[in-house]
Amino acid sequence: MSWRGFLGRKEDTVIWIALKMLMGDKSKYFAIVFGVSFACFLITEQSAIFCGVMLRTTSQIRDTHGADIWVMNTGVRYVDDLKAISDDDLFRVRSVPGVAWAVNLYRGQGQAQLADGTYQGVILMGLDDASLTGAPTHMLVGKIGDLQFPDAILVDEAGFHQMWPGEPLHAGRVIEMNQRRAVVVGVYRASQTFMTMPIIYTRFSQATLFVPPTPTGRLTPFVLAKAQPGVDPEELTRRIAEQTDLKALTNVGFANLTMMYYLQHTGIPVNFGTTVLLAFLVGTAIAGQTFYLFTVENLKQFGTLKAMGMSDQRIVAMILIQGGVVGAIGYGVGVGLASAYGIFAQRAMPLLAFFLPWQVLALSAAAMTLIVLLASLLSIRRVLVLEPAIVFQGGA
Amino acid sequence: MNAAVQIARGATCRNLIKDYGSGDSRVRALRGLDLDIAPGELTLLVGPSGCGKTTLISILAGTLDPTSGDVSVLGVDLRRLSKYEKAAFRAKNVGFVFQQFNLLPALTAVENVAVPLVINGSSKAAAVTRAAEVLKAVGLGERVHSLPSQLSGGQQQRVAIARALVHQPRLLVADEPTSAIDARTGQAIMKLIRELALRPDRVAVVVTHDARVFDFGDRIVTLEDGRVAGAKRVERAVKNGQLTPA
């Protein structure tokens, strides 16, 4: 049955009465809209923070520009799960048809000794000496090319402040790693990471000196590769995996693998899932109760309409229209509030993780639809069982 | 038109029984009630509280099903109608006046009056135009855009009467239409009901406790304990000439 057919020939009049009833009492109307908006805000905001936190687990992958494909040990489960591969693997990757170029990328954890003798754990990134592929793009002090100087390193902005609190960003600071001198030649802005350690970039050859030797002598955890023009990176990952027995993933694939690891092996989903679920339940309770109470308070009016011969179909349509309007307005206001919260809260608290992709908007829309439907169904049931004769009894 | 035909087009109840609840908590509101209501006259249902007046008009209006017995209104056997057919019957044929007016508070007077027309399929514009005419007829031409909360009790009941009559129903049921308003206004309301509701083909039934408005009826039916205890015609001679049906 079509929508118009469901409502009847003069469906516009049903909409008119439904909206009049809904918006007639301004205080009740705003209470319902507030309830639904608050529910939507809670769900959207919590989901966006969850997405923001998850996104941070992949910030190092997203900040590594220039390559299409990450090649790694088959046992790697996420970006911080460092398992070295053979130095020869770089050449094996380069030999795979469709690979335009491939370079080593060192990633590991080091210990930086500051001038005052204190130690600071750092994430150390070693870029291909010749091309500096994967270097940061947003430099605040210095330039990428300065990495070619001896002992040169780049430090991220947050890391700089962590190691030298209160100091303005500048080059020239010296630290020691593995008893080797390292000179800060530039400061860059990195995406917020899941960890809080400073991220130091240097050349690959330099990085091998900044960390102690490993028992196997292997240091390279990743090879970055670029597909030749016209070659599908996804297809190329399969080819590399087949020919090298290594794991090869696109940037997106590696980011997804990392996020899935955090989802499956950390308390994040449970803790955040609980929060999001609570937001959903609280939102459902608030929105559902206010809308249900609205219907209950209007039972006398619905009873009068039933007595006057309005069909159950039309009354159901009225309640659904009222629910739909409240849901749509509440969704708009709630999402708007969540977006504004994200913008302003991130300005005030840069560490706040907030990411609002379209999927969260779709999730919120689905949640609001569900909430409104649940509340409407409860209300509809209450109205459908209402005997029109009750209007004669002064109760209703 | 002979009496038999009039009764056929009025309302007829035969051995009407209505129980509320079940088992030990069952309450019998109507106990085999027999009644004929003729069109073209105003029938007042009177009697003590709990005698079954409201139950009877609910059944006559098609908003309540009897437990057993026969009820025919305007020649239609209501027991044979489905729920949807009954709603359609009410929409087309029944006008309601309630004790507490039951106006939709968010709608203006004219919009309230337009509702029955809208339910019957009129466009909003046509319904509002017609509703304004009827409001004018009940003396509220200046208050068409007022909300119910901005009207006095008497004015609200006038709006309710306009709403009950706007779609020209053939059955008017009024439940204590004067009980929530003062005596003088109540008399005016009853006068209005007589003037506007009475037509040769129209059945009008008013439930009332208010003895001061008994003179406005053509026939007074007294209920007691779920049955008709008596019925009498109101002598026209005692009535004010102005109250003669149109």
Image (spheres, coloured by chain):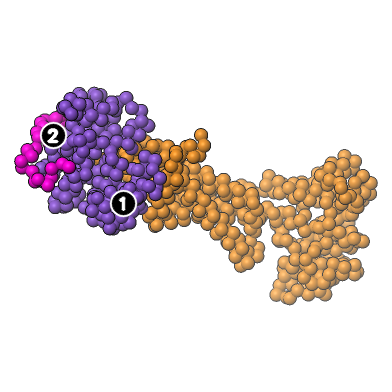
Chain colours: A orange, B purple
Q: Nearer the viewer, residue B182 or B190?
A: B190
Residue shown at 45% from the left, 45% from the top: A12
In the rendered view, does B140 fall on the left or right side of A267? left
Residue shown at 91% from the left, 52% from the top: A101
As displayed, is residue A276 above or below residue A128?
Answer: above
Q: Quadrant of residue A204?
A: bottom right
Q: Residue furthest left?
A: B237
- Residue B187 x/y as whole percent: 14, 49
Q: Nearer the viewer, residue A23 or A67?
A: A23
What is the chain letter for disc 2?
Answer: B
Residue B221, numbered label: 2
Give the number of callouts.
Answer: 2
Amino acid under disc 2: Val
How far apart marks 2 and 1 lie (CA) works out to 35 Å
- Local packing at callout 2 (Cα closer than 10 Å; few below 14, some 14-19, many 20+) is many
Q: Circle 1 sits on which residue? A: B132
